[in-house]
């Protein structure tokens, strides 16, 4: 683990669609979430696929990373506001 | 940091300044970023005194660096140094074709000699370097070549037409070489820096009238990020882009331009 993103808080959309042992591996989003974690970032995994997204986030946490899962339909502005502003 | 561990890298135009200089050029700043990432670096330039001193300074900090003379316009210089690299290290992983010159002239004031000199160093030098280095890289079936173009290889400006021609040539010869060297798993990319505070600018400031310099500094307003930050791009920022393209992190990146210009050419 290196530290190129130490102290950064990162939101990655479409990053919760697959697990580490999924048939076709992680997508761009999941791979990015994993790499960001390895570089020291706090990562908010978001997707519309809540079950898999939450499981993937648990997998990251089990590896000792600082990850959180949040539902986000990127086409819905209300959901963006809820996620970013609360 | 170890993104370039075990890599042998040759960087042209990287020995014109030392750590005592007001500012390091893109070449010198790239040498430092490469050293920090674990590479063995061959500094090369036509400024042997400064280049040797820069290498000594870095050696005293524990880095594995060497200085070799290369006038990039002379094929014999390339052959000498590439042969030395093969004999000494048995391979070359990275070539950064950085050596370049610019002149504060325009279409009307450019002489034929100005044109030839600019294109010899910036364009022909890049070609000779790719040809010489890729011959050694082919033996290892791997390598990364990073050619320094410019945002002025993408768009025009009120200044030197010869510089624009040379930097445009660098971009497109990089793409052609990327296609021709892909069978040997050698990658070729270019970097297009924007308004960088380099020694080239420091010299320009010394050589032109204060009015002309003010006009030039006014160009910072043309770049969204330079305008917001009210500063020039540090040369180390270009070095970090070069580290990425040179490293195995970019093993699927070839034939592209990495534009580091504060958004100037996004407009």
Image: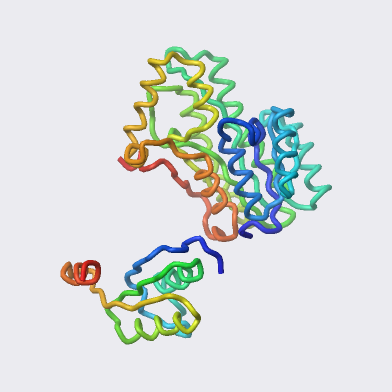
As drawn, is B4 to the left or to the right of A71? right
Q: Position of residue B52 (x, y in %)?
A: 74, 34
Can you give x and y, in whole percent of width and height, for residue B19 in the image?
Answer: 64, 36
- Where on the picture, by quarter, is residue B151? top left
Looking at the figure, which quarter contains the N terminus of chain A? Answer: bottom right
Along the line of sight, which residue is nearer the eye, B125 or A61? A61
Residue at left offset 42%, top offset 22%: B159
Whether residue A50 is situated above or below residue B94 in the rendered picture: below
Q: Give the image location of residue B91, x and y in percent.
A: 75, 52
- Within the image, what quadrant is residue B232 found in? top left
What residue do we see at 81% from left, 42% from top?
Answer: B84
The answer to which of A27 and B138 lies nearer the viewer is A27
Picture mark count: 0
Q: Name the side, left or right, on which B5 lies relative to B201.
A: right
The residue located at (73%, 49%) in the rendering is B62
Asked whether the viewer can see residue B137, the reply is: no
Q: Is residue B242 visible?
A: yes
Q: Is residue B192 above or below residue A72?
A: above
Q: Position of residue B27 (x, y in %)?
A: 60, 38
Give the camera-side residue of A49 and B62: B62
Q: What's the colour scheme?
A: rainbow
Q: Residue placed at 65% from the left, 45% from the top? A: B95
On-image quarter of the C terminus of chain A: bottom left
- Picture layout, residue A4 above or below residue B87: below
In front of the other: B194 or B209: B209
The relative height of residue B162 versus residue B92 in the rendered view (above or below) is: above
């Amino acid at each position: 683990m290196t530290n190129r993103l130490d102290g950064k808080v990162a939101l990655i959309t479409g990053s919760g669609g697959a697990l580490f042992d999924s048939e076709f591996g992680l997508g761009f989003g999941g791979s990015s979430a994993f790499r960001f974690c390895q570089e020291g970032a706090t990562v908010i995994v978001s997707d519309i696929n809540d079950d898999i997204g939450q499981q993937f986030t648990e997998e990251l946490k089990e590896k000792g990373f600082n990850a959180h899962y949040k539902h986000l339909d990127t086409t819905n502005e209300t959901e963006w506001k809820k996620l970013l502003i609360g | 940091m170890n993104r370039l561990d075990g890599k042998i890298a040759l960087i042209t135009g990287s020995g014109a300044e030392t750590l005592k200089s007001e500012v390091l050029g893109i070449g010198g700043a790239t040498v430092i970023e490469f050293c920090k990432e674990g590479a063995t670096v061959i500094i090369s330039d036509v400024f042997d005194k400064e280049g040797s001193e820069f290498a000594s300074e870095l050696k005293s900090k524990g880095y594995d660096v060497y200085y070799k003379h290369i006038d990039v316009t002379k094929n014999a210089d390339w052959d000498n140094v590439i042969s030395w690299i093969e004999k000494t290290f048995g391979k070359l992983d990275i070539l950064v074709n950085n050596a370049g010159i610019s002149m504060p002239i325009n279409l009307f004031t450019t002489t034929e000699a100005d044109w030839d000199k600019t294109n010899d160093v910036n364009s022909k030098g890049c070609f000779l370097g790719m040809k010489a280095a890729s011959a050694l890289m082919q033996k290892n079936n791997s390598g990364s070549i990073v050619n320094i173009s410019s945002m002025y290889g993408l768009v025009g400006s009120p200044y030197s037409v010869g510089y624009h021609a040379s930097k445009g040539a660098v971009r497109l010869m990089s793409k052609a070489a990327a296609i021709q060297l892909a069978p040997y798993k050698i990658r070729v990319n270019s970097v297009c820096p924007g308004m960088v505070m380099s020694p080239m600018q420091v010299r320009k400031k010394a050589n032109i009238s204060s009015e002309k310099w003010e006009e030039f500094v006014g160009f910072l307003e043309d770049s969204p990020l330079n305008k917001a930050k009210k500063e020039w791009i540090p040369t180390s920022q270009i070095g970090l882009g070069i580290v990425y393209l040179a490293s195995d992190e970019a093993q699927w990146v070839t034939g592209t331009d990495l534009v580091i210009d504060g958004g100037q050419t996004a407009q």
